[in-house]
Structure formats: C-alpha cells, structure tokens
Amino acid sequence: MTAVVRSELLKIRTTRGWWAYLVVLVALVGIGAAAEVGSRSLDERSGLDFQYALVDLIGISSLLAIILGITIVTTEFRHGTITPTLLATPGRERVLAGKAIAGVLIAILFAAMAIIVVLVVASIYTSIDGGQLELADGEVVKRGATNVLGVVLWLLMGLAIGSVVHSQVAALVGTLVWLFLVETLLVGLFSLLDIDAVQEYLPFRALDGADGTGGDNLLSYGPALAVTLGWIAVLGAAGAVRTSRRDIT
Amino acid sequence: MIEVEGLSKRFGKTQAVAGLSFRVEPGTITGFLGPNGAGKSTTLRSVLGLVHPDAGSATVLGVPYRRLDRPLHRVGAVLEASEVHPGRSGRNHLRVQAAAAGLPASRVDEVLALVELSAAAKRRVKGYSLGMRQRLGLATALLGDPEVLVLDEPANGLDPAGIRWLRDLLRSLAAEGRTVLVSSHVLSEVAQTVDRVVIIHRGRLIQQAAISEVLAGAQGATRVRTPEAERLRELLKAQGVTVSDTEDGALLVSVPPERVGELTAANGIVLHELVVERATLEEVFLELTGGETTE
C-alpha cells in the first residue's frame, strides 16, 4: 500500500496544476487573514471571536480540496492514465484506497499551509499595529483541529464524487452546480413544504456543519460529522463498485 | 504463458470478441494480427484485466492478471501511446509507475536510455511526437524487467528507422528468453520479426501457427517471362491452367515451375525468366480474412 500511496502522491506533485493549487491557497488565505486583522480594532483582536475567525480561514482550502479530490480520480480517465495505473496495481479498490490516503495527506498539507499563512500574515500585521497575536487558548486549537478535519472531509467528498462520475467536466461542473444552485433550490423547496429540518441532511449542508464553524440551520457538530461520513461512505461505496465494474477501453 | 479460452466480449451492439481461444508459447514472438476492429485491443485488454469478458477466461503466467503478485515485474504492456498525462514529463511518468512497482528511480534512467529517450526525458509529454510516445510506452513496459511483453500496435507512428529499431529491440528481448505478444494491422511490420502468428477476424480465431507454416500452406504462383507470351498463354489455357498478367509484362501461372518448363521445352518456347512467387503474409492474410483490407 505504501507503494501505491507514494505513486499517487507523485502523480499529484508532477503536474503544473499542483503549483496553481498552492499559489491560489496562499493568496486567498493571505488576503483573508489580512482582511480579518484589518477589519478589527486592537481591542477586538484579543477576543475569542477574532481568534476563531482567524483559524476558520483554514476552511478556504475546502473548495480547493474538493476540486483536487475530484481531479485525483477523474484526471486518470480524462488522460487515459488509468490504464498504466491499473497495470501497476490491478486491484481497483486498492487504487482508490491509495488515492484516499494520498488525498488525506494533501488535505492536511493544505490546512497546515493555511495555518502557517494565517499565523505569518496575522502576526506581522498585528505587530505593525503595535500589538501581539494571541492564540494561546485551547479552544482555538480545538477549533483549528475541526477545521483541518473539515478540509479532509471536503477532499474525501470530492474523491467519492469523482469515483462515481468519471468524466472530469461532468464531475466538476455537477458538483459546483449542486453546491451553489441545487442545494439552495432544495432548501427553498423544503421550506415551502414546511419540512425545513430535512435540509440539514443534504450533503453539503452536512459538510458545512462538519467543519465545526457553526451556522444557521445546520446540524450540530457531532451529527453533522456523522451525516457527512455517511454521504462519503455511500458515494465512496458506489464509486468503488462503479470503478471496479468499468471496462477500461 | 498467455492463454485465452473461449473469450467473448460485447460492447453494446458490437460483438468485439466471440469465443476466441489461443495460446502464446513461452520464449516466442507471436504476432497478433487482424484488420482494424477485429477485436485485438479488446482481447489484449481482457488479458491484462482491464476489460471484463462476458464469457471465457484469459490468463498470463497461469493466473488472471489481477492475481499476479508484483505485476509490472512479470508482465510489461504498451497499449496506447496516448495514455500519458500531457503535462507530466516522460521521466516523471516513469517515476510514477516505478513508485507503484516499488522500483528505484535509477531504473527509470536505465529504461530511458534503453529506448533512446534520455535527451527528452525532462520535457512534457505534450511536446512528444507519436514515435517518442511509443518509445515512452515501451520504456514503461520494460521498467520491471518483465518476462512477458504485450504490445498493442507498437509500430504506430514510428518512422522506418524507428520500425527497424523496434524490430531489433523485440528480437533482442525474445533472444533473452522473453515472451512477446505483439499486435498489428500492418503485416509488413511484423512479418520479419515474429515466430508465430495468431490471426483473428471479427473476434474469431482464423489461424494460429508458426509463420513458416502459414506461408508454406499458402498457394504460390509461378512467374514466367518469354518473348512468346501469347503462344504460351494459349498452350497453358488449353490445359486448364489459370494465367494472369503482371504489370511488367510477365505471366503469373497457377502451376509449379516444373510443369511450365516441361511445356515450354516440348514446344520449343524460349524462356527469359522462371521463378516461384511465394505468397506474402499480406496475401495469406487477405485470403484468410476474405479480402478485407488491412488498412
């Protein structure tokens, strides 16, 4: 399995897209951190709200994580590299498992980079203003950890989607349309039908609740995590069956 | 070594392979021949565990490909030259495969040198010619130093020098005791290289035999050149022999040269040329597949 994971990590690192992910990540998180610091007075900056807001910037990596998750699987079908991949590792579930492990490692790397960028930008900005960045609270660390787990979940969701929908364009466009349009429409529909509670179980509403940052009309953290893992498991299982049965022609 | 038994596969309305059985003997180069669409790629992909057959089985080294332990060390395959990420360099493509097979990066540089691609190794595959992609494919197949090689149309996109290079490479690989199964729809490419042929058409086996047998079994002709062509033609026709003209004015006759010689001697006809024309693999192939073109 180590060999499969090493090969998958190498695949991710050896295309130009990889650098684009890192540049976009650093830029977005950096801008986010600067805006967060700049919009608060010195007094506000010692509050827990501010510190939470800072670590919540880790969540910016989520969208990149889901796109990468989808791409990790679908790029193999787009470029036909699935053939050499399966010649090296004929067990298709093993290939998907290798991709999942590599994906988790990359998601953690994304989150770690986001944390570093936030800390660097925020401490520099704060010291210019003559203050000092405080992040000593254990609650903040816990909040950061749930954020990191959230990025991992977004990546795994993408990977599960990609293993079901092998067409890269369909998977990416479908996911974005579902995320930004379909779920919103469904939420409206449920509210018309007076069954508001159902919306909390939609995949991306659950995922939203599972990053630990809270929000209106979301499940609380524990149930949201469970529902998200359920969606990932169902999609992942469907993807494993679909990928195993497919003829690679 | 490679054993295909009653293999059938249908894609939608197309029966790609229909009850195909053949064996590839160890230590030989076997040509897997058939017109485009004969089911060659589907068969090879079934052998490699990429396509699920509807019926029948395909094994390599005695087991289905999926059950091979460390498959890249046992079987090397080149299927389509385009199955490489265009944004990745040739060397990185090989590194990805080497990592999956647990092979060191030094092996990558060895196979790059073997296929004479070292100079272009760090360039993106996007900029490779088809011939370079074929070489990269061969390098991928050779990574694990496998005892069996399965090559699908490896000569596509190679220039004449490249085809000669491929031929020499295949010969030296077979000389090392490896088993090679190489498919082609262009017969002249393989005729000089292979020991045995498996000929398929519309998903069915037409013939599997040593190439010498295939050629020996084919009907030859006798080529005759004489200043008295018309007289000889009449004499032969009178005996019920089929005669046709060649482009350069000679006669092509469907009987052995002995009979032509006896007939001309008895009638005092001068001969300028009397040669046995061997059927080429191309002609045999056209005959066996009912005259469908190979291109």
Image (tube, rainbow, N blue to C red):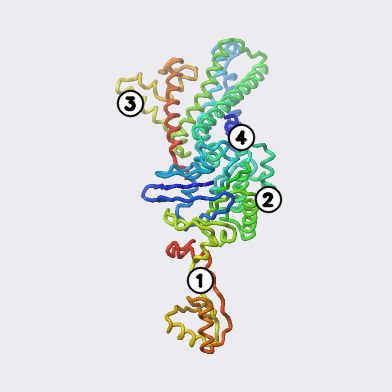
Label 2 – label 1 distance at C-alpha:
41 Å
> Hey, which quadrant is residue A18 in on the image?
top right
**Would you name the residue on which mark 2 appears?**
B116
| Mark in front: 4 vs 1 | 1
Assign a secondary structure to mark 4. Answer: helix
Confirm or deny contact between disc 3 and disc 4 (CB under 8 A).
no
Q: Chain of mark 1?
A: B
**Residue drawn at 52 percent across, 43 percent down:** B60
3D distance between C-alphas at marks 4 and 1: 57 Å
Vertical placement of residue B191 versus A112, above or below: below
Q: Chain of mark 3?
A: A
Quadrant assignment for the N terminus of chain A: top right
Q: Comparing marks 4 and 2, which lies closer to the viewer?
A: 2
Residue A10's disc is: 4
Given the image, what chain letter belongs to the residue carrying mark 4? A
Work out how far the residue at label 4 is from the one at label 2, CA to CA, in angstroms: 24 Å
Could you tell me the amino acid type at mark 1?
Gly
Residue that label 1 marks = B220
Q: Which one is closest to the eye, mark 3 or mark 1?
A: 1
Residue denoted by label 3: A189
Tell me which amino acid carries mark 4.
Leu
Question: Label 2 marks which chain's residue?
Answer: B
- Residue A243, horizontal then vertical, whole percent: 45, 36
Q: What residue do we see at 42% from left, 48% from top?
A: B6
Amino acid type shown at disc 2 = Glu
Spatial distance from mark 3 to mark 4, Cα to Cα?
A: 44 Å
**Element on which disc 2 rests:** loop
* Cα–Cα gap, marks 2 and 3: 63 Å
